[in-house]
Amino acid sequence: MELESAKKLVQELREKIEYYSKLYYEQDDPAISDYEFDRLMHRLIDLEEEYPQLLTPDSPTHRVGGKASNSFAPVEHVVQMGSLQDVFSAEEVIDFDRRVRETIPNPVYVVEPKIDGLSVSLEYRDGILVRGSTRGDGFVGEDVTQNIRTISSVPLRLNKPIPFVEVRGEVYMPAASFEKVVAQQELKEEKPFKNPRNAAAGSLRQKNPKITAQRGLDIFVFNLQQIEGVEVNGHKESLDLLKELGFQVSPSYPQADSIEKAIAEIERIGQNRGEYSFDIDGAVVKVDSLAQREQLGATAKFPKWAVAFKYPPEEKITTLLDVEVQVGRTGALTPTAIFEPIQLAGTTVSRAVLHNQDFIDEKQIAVGDKIIVRKAGDIIPEVVAVAEHCGQAVYQLPEYCPSCHTKVVREEGVAAIYCPNMQCPAQLMRNLIHFASRNAMDIDGMGPAVLEGLVHAGWVKSAADLYELTQEQVASLERMGKKSAENLMNALEKSKENDLSKVVFALGIPNVGEKTAAQLAEHFGNMEKLSVATEQQLVEMEGFGEIVAQGIVRFFAQESNQQEIERLRKVGINMESKKEKAGDIFAGKTFVLTGTLPTLKRNDAKELIESLGGKVSSSVSKKTSYVVAGEEAGSKLDKANELGIAVLSEAELLEMARG
């Protein structure tokens, strides 16, 4: 490869790796599999070694992990929490052994599963847990002690009062916990976690430890970082000691006195990876002797005494038997592939989401085809491609809703096909959860369990039915006493006084979020005017495009939706906007809020700015006029300073508001 071509490829790889790293480490929202990411990094490392003149100080290959979040106090790691060099073949493992033997004549290895979770440090003084922290970038992590304490397998007190010990472990989410959490997220129409690693990271970094406690996290300890008062000579010996102290250590860590035995253990772990109750993405081979590790040392990036073997995603061919169509809260029709059961990553799978018609068309999927299926992140089944076409026509989603038989619609430029009927039985439970949620009608106490009981009893078939319930009916529900029923009835009554913006958002109009609902309520003033608004009137509003406008017009044109709105009006729901514009001092100005303000809640500050004609954005850009910063202001404040944008305190904001 010519130098110029290599230079171009290196730049492309760095941009991709930085982008995917940010999603993975800082937003807990991976866009590609770990295997694909590791391949990109591996290719970049090879190129930089081949063309050392292309290696720059800002290359992602210098990094071990992502930056620490500013949501928690920083923790400097005395012992660096590094990462291992990845290998993808037996030949590369043999190469590793050859390099080790150049320094160490007869190495003994320890081989263990590589658990796919979030790496943490646990510190104990006199046998008591004093701190838990994340890896961060390997040098500085985050203090998550309170959340770590909620994990039942983390010992709060060791079996022996050792003066000081620091261990490294992997916090993970077992498959059963992951499936439970995702099911709850889908029911609430929340964005579900993509894989168990993503779920573990998101759960451990919750600001509220109670949420972490509900997520069913677990941990395996796999390394001794520091210890005082006890002499340890080998890795296996250290894991045996940690087990005695009360830690849940790596599920298996046999020794191997030859690289052939180590490779055999890698293969055994790979063949049995589906039998674990947790996700693994590889196997780790480590030199056992700690003294020999000292001799081997490390490169600038990795220790020379260990490698991580990464398994490729497992793929299998099966026959597509049918396509099942489900209807979500927003009315979107989601096709699911039903295929002959296959074993993937140790579990039997027979279903995979096909997303939408565009996805089906792109892959030319027809019922009867032989399809290739794999588990994304080794947990979520997905259709990769068609292996063999059966000759039938490509599957088409139905023209009518499979639940209520209303004609479905597809807006131009939107992938989803949806049912516009808000009273569609298939959408009922999700619609009700959304309707009662905090940002919508804010009916305190009207959670999923209560709603499920009301629907099951046959008392609620639409949102308007909630306001015709009696206290006796509510009190008769499981775990609902007289006082709870009274509180819920009061909450229902209180919700009738909500502003029109909350009612509009609660209706679940396609593409109408909280902000859009507030704009509509303020612009039209009441539900009557909004319900007869034309597409032209809507697109003339700032920020409204044709797709959003068409969806709103179509929603109100649906007779069943008009009937439901009329019922809500009759039970006493406010259909008027209460918002009065205080002035236009902030007209043309865009604000960004960050951190905790001394007296104002985030929503209060937002409402104040908007009432004075300003806009509130979620991200800082060159178009931002002011950043309002409170305590623990993070990256948004940094970016404001970087761009030279004016930063205000709460007091300065209030002073500006007074004119």
Image (spheres, grey):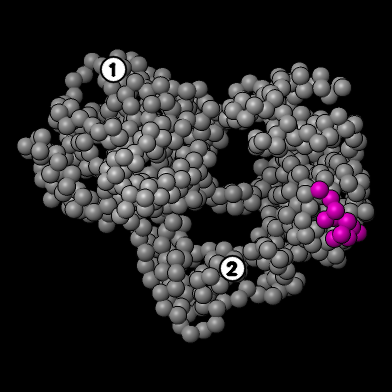
Q: Which residues are magenta?
A: 531-542
Q: Which element carries disc 2, helix, strand or loop?
A: helix
Residue type (three-letter) at the residue carrying disc 1: Ile
Query: Residue 367: which numbered mark, if any?
Result: none
Q: Is residue 278 at least partly visible in the picture?
A: no
Badge number at residue 162: 1
Which badge, 1 or 2, comes first in the chain's sequence?
Answer: 1
Q: Comparing marks 1 and 2, which lies closer to the viewer?
A: 2
From the viewer's perspective, is residue 253 above or below residue 323?
Answer: above
**Viewer-nearest residue: 476 or 518:** 518
**Where is 434 relative to 609, above or below?**
below
In front: 550, or 598? 550
Q: Is residue 281 left or right of residue 206?
A: left
Q: Secondary structure under badge 1?
A: loop
- Which quadrant holds residue 343? bottom left
Q: Which residue is mark 2?
A: 358
The extreme left residue here reads 105
Q: Position of residue 659 (x, y in %)?
A: 87, 22
Label 1 to label 2: alpha-carbon separation = 60 Å
Residue type, label 2: Asp
Q: Residue at x 23, y 32 (%)?
A: 298
